[in-house]
Image: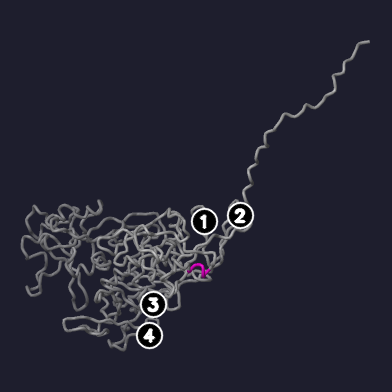
Amino acid sequence: MLQHGFAFLGLFLGLLIFGKVASENYGCPPGWHFGSNCGNNNCYRVVSIPPANKPRAIDDNFCARFDKDSMPAIIKCEEENSFIPTLPKYHFLIQRGGLGLGIYVPINVGWSKKNFQNRDGTPIGYTKWGFVSHILGGIREPGPGGPSEKLTVLLTYKRPKGFEYTWHDYPPAAVRHLLCKRPAILEPEKLLPAVERNDVDGTYVCPAGFDVGHVCGGHYCYRVVPVPEANRPRMIDDNFCKVFENEASPAVIRCKEENDLMVTLSDNVDIADTSGFALGLYIPASKPWSQTNFVTYDGSPIEYLNWGIYNSAQGPFKEPNGFLNGYPERIVSYRRFKDEGTYVNTWHDVGAPASPHLLCKSSAKFKPITPKTIKDEFGEYSCPKDWILGNVCGEHHCYKLVPVPASKSARVIDNNYCGEIDKRSIPAIIRCDEENEFLSTPPFAPTAIQMGFALGLYIPQSQPWSVNGFINYDGSKVEYLKWGISYKNKPPLKEPNGFKNSITEKAVMYRMQKNGSGYHKTWHDYAPTVVKKILCKMPATGVGLMSKPPAQDPPPPPTQMPEPIPTKPERKTCAV
């Protein structure tokens, strides 16, 4: 009973740390991460400090260059100190060189333990000073490195019970990254729209905050959630996913298609590149560590495994190996590594403290498609049941995302693959901003986020690639364009750029790329051979259409004056 009580307490603390006030919604500017802790709602961002700015980065508030309301972060409580490393890439940066904080000795003041102060002028309350060195007898920071160590850095060290995050005074010249902090922005309450995926007979819907995926023959919802340090040892045993969605549980990956999908959802790739996220494959706390003791959370048979390689000074080791720390390494972490120029998404056994994120999964809910009809003053418009009706740019059209067989992708637009689905349809040509925005809504949005879909703007295979060579499939004049930016390039490049492969990048894909709390909804040139889906479009069917009454023409002018009608002469009377 006591064990269940602690589990419940852990879930409750998780809600306190990561929940939002029910009647209020707080957000952050693009590039900032939200956190609710110490009774406050804040936004965090790590920035790089150029060498020239390092000596006065805190004194001059270098953070204000990125947001006028931000300052070097002052950590107010243990809850906040534990929360910072759970943000994407922060644990990695803390390990590599530390994050500068807003507690310091001003440049015009001599070094002394008593001279450290908060940059915002508030009294120093909470501190987390670490030890200088156990070799030196466990001397507590700040000190004794010398008078130049006027800046405080958040660092981490591996301890027998996991990672410990403590503060250390450093010379400003040695600090590469600064943690900035600003108050969160109070916004009108709004829920993220449920993400939907179109199917032949209906739509599959996920809860707000979850991404949808159609893999391994099923429809599922996914979300990577942060896990407080106190909950990590039993996050899978106790199903920490239920804090966010009652029907969710730690994700059990069933096939390669599902494994590859995970890094395409939301911000998962950033987490996979740094700390990784835990899966629903683990060794229960009741069992000893063994390569054969890994089980799925839901008790189902293990159908798919993708163990990676651990490269150490002693040589490469195939996972799971419990390397150096076998018995506590009960968690399986999904990681992405670069291997000879390409990325691999593999699994690694780790200790619970080293996995601050958990991948949650639930079944998507089926919602039958209701045939939609649009009425206006001239009639009704409708589409076949598995097409989506849109009234945009002053016209009524039907849209459908169609999977493209690999054997047809090279000439998917040249040969009008849409015509094989419905002879009236062609690859979609986008005519205006209203239509471009329409395609960022369900059921198109999930595909636009995950992989993109081809449009009817292209360069024919018979023509060479050029920036000005893109034409509409139907031969109409190109009057609307929404080229985006390729952020994978350094520096980013404006599309169309034919990056690395200009000869073949003759297809145009509609993509939705994360932009802070929203998305860029733009077009990008791709090789037709990578097209997995194409957007087909055709006019909607008009039912009972009425035409406007023709204007009444005035009668033609007479060619000659009509003859006067004869009248009887006026009769005169005489008086008798």
Above/below status of 440 relative to 327: above
- Taking depth in this image into account, of 266 and 533 the one nearest to the observer is 533
Which numbered marker is on residue 302?
4
Q: Nearer the viewer, mark 2 or mark 4?
A: 2
Does the rendering let one see residue 126? yes
User: Tag 3, which secondary structure?
Assistant: helix
Return the residue at label 2.
379
Which numbered marker is on residue 391?
1
- Which image quarter: residue 214? bottom left
Q: Quick check: marks 2 and 4 in contact, CB under 8 Å? A: no
For the record, the magenta segment spans 417-421
- Which image quarter: residue 279? bottom left
Q: Quick check: marks 1 and 4 in contact, CB under 8 Å? A: no
Q: Earlier in the sequence, mark 1 or mark 4?
A: 4
Q: Please name the amino acid that badge 1 sits on.
A: Asn
- Which image quarter: residue 295? bottom left
Where does residue 30 sit, x and y in percent of width and height? Answer: 31, 58
- Taking depth in this image into account, of 206 and 78 the one nearest to the observer is 206
Mark 2 and mark 4: Cα distance apart in space: 56 Å
Classify mark 3: residues with Cα within 10 Å, few (<14), some (14-19) or many (20+): few
Q: Please name the amino acid that badge 3 sits on.
A: Glu
Q: Nearer the viewer, mark 4 or mark 3?
A: 3
